[in-house]
Each structure stands twice: as structure tokens, then as C-alpha cells.
Image: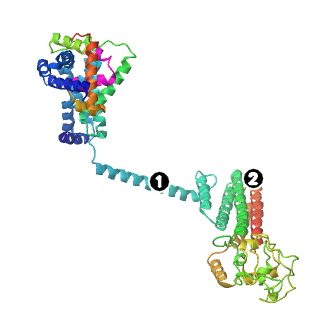
Amino acid sequence: MQSEESLIRRAQQRDQVALTQLYEENFDKIYRYICIKIGDRTEAEDMTQQVFLNAIQSISSYKSKGMPFSSWLYRIAHNQVVDHLRKKSKRITVPLDETIPFQGDDPRRVVEQKLAIEAIAAAAMGLTRAQQEVISLRFAGELSVAECARTMGKSEGAIKALQHIAIVALRKALGREV
Amino acid sequence: MSKARKFDDILNECIERMLKREPIETCLAAFPEHAAELEPLLRTAMATRKAADIQPRAEFRQRAAHEFQAAVRNLKPRRSSSLRWQLRLVTVISVVVIVLMAGTGTVAAATNSLPDQPLYGVKLFTENVRVALTPSAVGKAELYAQFTDTRVSEIIKMADEGKVAEVEKATERMNSNLTAITRLTQSAGDTGTAGGTPPVLSSASAAAEAPPSTPTTMPVPTPTTISVPTPTTMSVPTPTIILVPTPAPITATAAAPNVTTPQALPKPVVPPPSVPTPVPGVPTQAPSFAQKVTPVPAPTPEKATSVNATRLAGTQKAENTAKNNEKPDLQTTVSQQAQKNTQDLEEALKRVPDNVKPSLQKAIDVAGKGYEEALKNMDKKR
């Protein structure tokens, strides 16, 4: 934590190396977090990029308060997802990843993954916001229960209970396919 | 620990193991009593984990990294905290200095402005502020006298330039200033020594305002023994002590302390609470200047002389005399100004364009009447 604090201090002084290091450490997690929340890889890419651009603009005002730096990034990402879903509910869109094939990866795996993400994202829509957040942070963001608790402002016991209920609800929503 | 809480913990432990790539079966074997309940949940968790276990596309990763680096390069390096504070301090000080300089400069520039100039409003505002910040009535009257002088100068300048409207406006302002002098000298006289330093209206009035040197208390007549008051107290009857019937005027020559004249003076009627009931042998507080002066008609010259002669005695007299030596009194100032300003206005009347002459004549009339009223009012205070 001490090294992260030092890294953040340097990043707040606009140190390019420190900023790049924080970006590298959190980029994949944030991408996954957004992906599992919206179920759309292409839109998740744009949003992930925007999360980091927003972060470097406001990193000088960041205060640790004992929470990991990634908590702050997840909060930015969460706000962006909420904003995105609000806008999306007002317009009909055709997901770009249905028209643009992924290059470089095994197409079969890509399709399977796409379907899995979409299924999880759709099933998660039936969960409460807190349950969705626990699933995203735990399985996409790879945060521990303690980190989730700090990020969401809840006790570890509450996070464990939410996790249990969320998995039961997900299983139900997925039609017991898994 | 409740059963539900216990199961939450077990499920979480299994999920932690699963996230560390441990097979589900290991976990189920570790908790055989919960295996049936755990298994479907762990499989759902595993599916969720697999769905979320995605990597960003290489192209996207490259593009995003490139754009991020570009954004980082465009960031301006932040100054250190102490330097930022120093810069803020310098900025604040600079702003304060600029505002002060601009303010002082504007006021200074406005001092010489004329009614047809943009800064004239600032000039009038400054005058109002000066009046508002002056506590005493006499001080305010002196300021108004000064402003009247300024108004006369403005009238003459505007008249020379043929600006009738400005002459009329300045005349109105001059009239207001003169009215204020009259009003303030009245109030100064009314409240003269009610509290604090007595205002100086003129040498004569200053003497009149000075508290009597002797006695500081008024001897009180009794049916048997009457202490005859000093000329000061008796020649200027107070509004609160009514002598019935009015005694014969007592002049300075008639004044003799402690003369026993049992039938000479009638019993005084003393309405409360202005003056305490007289007690034989106990000196009574002398009436204040305000009590003495306000309702009193102007004394005859002979009486005034005697009054002033008496009141100028003692320490207070010396102080007032010293004060008068330092600074000309208001009446003298106004009197001199009246003479000079009327003269200046009349001289201007001879040379100004014909279209301004009626306005200027009106200004002369207003000045004459205003000064006369003010001086008459001050004269009453003698």
C-alpha cells in the first residue's frame, strides 16, 4: 500500500511513468468490470478508455482514505456504466461487435465468450444494484471481500451475504444452465 | 455464528480458492456436509468468472495505450504545493494593491471633476462618505460649508461654459449644502454639551457653551436663607426652573453670593425630574448647557456680555480659547465664504453668456439666502 501511495503521489505530480504504471496495473480489470456490466465488448473498450482519460484529469483531487486506488477507478467506471445504460435506454442501438469481427483471436472462443458475457450481463440485470456490483467487483475486478467492502462502504459480512444471494439469483436467471 | 453466516463464509472460502484456479472438487471435498448446496453455486460462480475472464483486444489495447500516453504528455506539469501557495499569495496581494491604487486614483481624480464629467458621481459619493464618517454635528456643518464652496466653484465653471442645466443642478446641491449647515448648527446648539466635547460654533457661543466656572452648583433659595445665584445661572433662566413671578433681571453687579434676602425671591417651582428638589444647604447640580440654551431667547447685549464674561472664566474658558486660536470657528468660516462666494458669483454674472445669466442670478439669490439663514441661525446661538 505504501508503494501504491508513493506511486499515486508521483502520478498526482503528473509523473508520466507513475501514471503509466497505474494504467497498466488497472486497465484489464476495469475493462472486464465494464464488460460484465454492459455485456458489450466494443462499448466497453470506449468506456474503459474514457475512464482512464477522466482519471488523469482528476487524479490531483484523489484522496486515498485507506481504499485501494482501483476503488476510485471502479467508481469512475461505475458512474460511466450508469450514464451509458441511461442513455442506451433512450435509443435503439446495434452493438458494433456484431458487425465487426474480432481479429487475432480464435473465432469460436470469441463467440462463446461473447455469448457467455451477454448471458451473464443479461442475467445480472435481474439483480439488485448492490448484488450486481459485488459480482462485477469480485469476478471481473478480482477484488477481495475486504476490498469490496471498503469500495462499497459495507461490512465484509454484508458483502459475503450479498455474494451468496447474487450467485443464487444469477443461477436462477441463467436457468440452471450452469 | 448463525448457520447462514457460516455458509456465507464457506461459500466465500470456496470462491477464493476457485479464483486461485483451484478445482471445485477440492472445495467440495473440504466441506462434504455442504457439498450438495455448494456445488451449483460454485459452478455458477465459475461460469461467471470464465465469462469475465476476457482480455482486451490487442488493437484496442495498443490504441488505448497510445491515446493515454498522448493525454499524459498533454498534461502540464504541476507546480509544487509551496510554489502554488506563493503564487496565490502574490496574486492576492497584487489584486489588493491594484484595487487600492485604482480606488485611490479614482477618488483623487474625482476630486477635481465637474458636474458634466463621468467621475462627478464619485466625487459626490466621496463627500457623502466623509459626512457619514464625521461624528459631530459641527464637523458635518464644516464639511457642508466646504462643499458649498466647491459647489460655487462648479457653478461658476459651468456658467462660464454656458451649461445652464449644470448650473441649475449645482445650485440645487449648493442649496442642499446650505440647508444642511443651518440644520446642523441648530442641532449642534440643541445638543451642545449634552455629551462629549462641546462643539465650537463661534467664539461667543463657545464661551456661552462653557459650563460656569463658579458655581458648579446652584445655590438654592430657602424661605429663611437664600443663596443668591451667580449672574450666570440667574441671568440665563433654565427651562426647567420656573420662577413665579419672574424676578427682576439680575445683572453682574447685582450678583453677590450668600446674601440673605428672605423676601427678595419667590419660592421656585421645580418640576421633576429635570432638577432635583432643592435641599437647604445641599448644592444642586447646575443645569446643562442644552437645558440652558435651547429655549432661551437671545439675551440682551448687556446680559450676553455679562454672561460671557462669567462663563469664560476658569479652565474650560482657557481650553475653548485655545481651541479657537487653533482653528477659525464655523461662523467665521461661513461668513467669510458667504462674502467671497457671493462676490465671485456676482463677478461671474458679468462675464457669462446671456443664456446662463438667469440661472446664475438664481444661484446668487440662493447662496445669499442660504448663507443668511445659516449665519442667522448661528447668531442665535450666541
Q: Is residue B126 magenta?
A: no
Q: CA distance from mark 2 to mark 1?
A: 43 Å
Q: Is residue B69 left or right of residue B176?
A: left
Q: Amino acid at mark 1?
A: Val
Q: Amino acid at mark 2?
A: Asn
Q: Identify which residue, B284 or A2, lies in the foreground.
A: B284
Q: What range is drawn magenta here?
A: A120-139
Q: Which residue is mark 2?
A: B355
| Residue drawn at 70 percent across, 53 percent down | B169
Q: Main secondary structure of the magenta part?
A: helix
- Count of numbered circles in the view: 2
**Residue at mark 1: chain:** B
Mark 1 surroundings: few (<14), some (14-19) or many (≥20) residues within 10 A: few
Quadrant housing the C terminus of chain B:
bottom right
Q: Which residue is mark 1?
A: B99
Q: Is residue B277 visible?
A: yes
Q: Is residue B250 left or right of residue B212?
A: right
Q: Is residue B239 left or right of residue B144?
A: right
Q: Is residue B273 left or right of residue A92?
A: right
Q: Picture coordinates of residue A127 (x, y %)?
A: 32, 19
User: Above or below — where is B217 with respect to A55?
Assistant: below
User: Above or below — where is A91 with respect to A1?
Assistant: above
Mark 2 surroundings: few (<14), some (14-19) or many (≥20) residues within 10 A: few
Q: Identify which residue, B70 or A97, lies in the foreground.
A: A97
Examine the image and state in which quarter residue B224 appears.
bottom right
Judge if badges 2 and 1 mark residues of a common chain: yes
Q: Identify which residue, B203 or A160, lies in the foreground.
A: A160
Examine the image and state in which quarter residue A163 appears.
top left
Examine the image and state in which quarter residue A17 appears.
top left
**Residue at mark 2: chain:** B
Q: Picture coordinates of residue B248 (x, y %)?
A: 87, 81
Mark 2 secondary-structure assignment:
helix
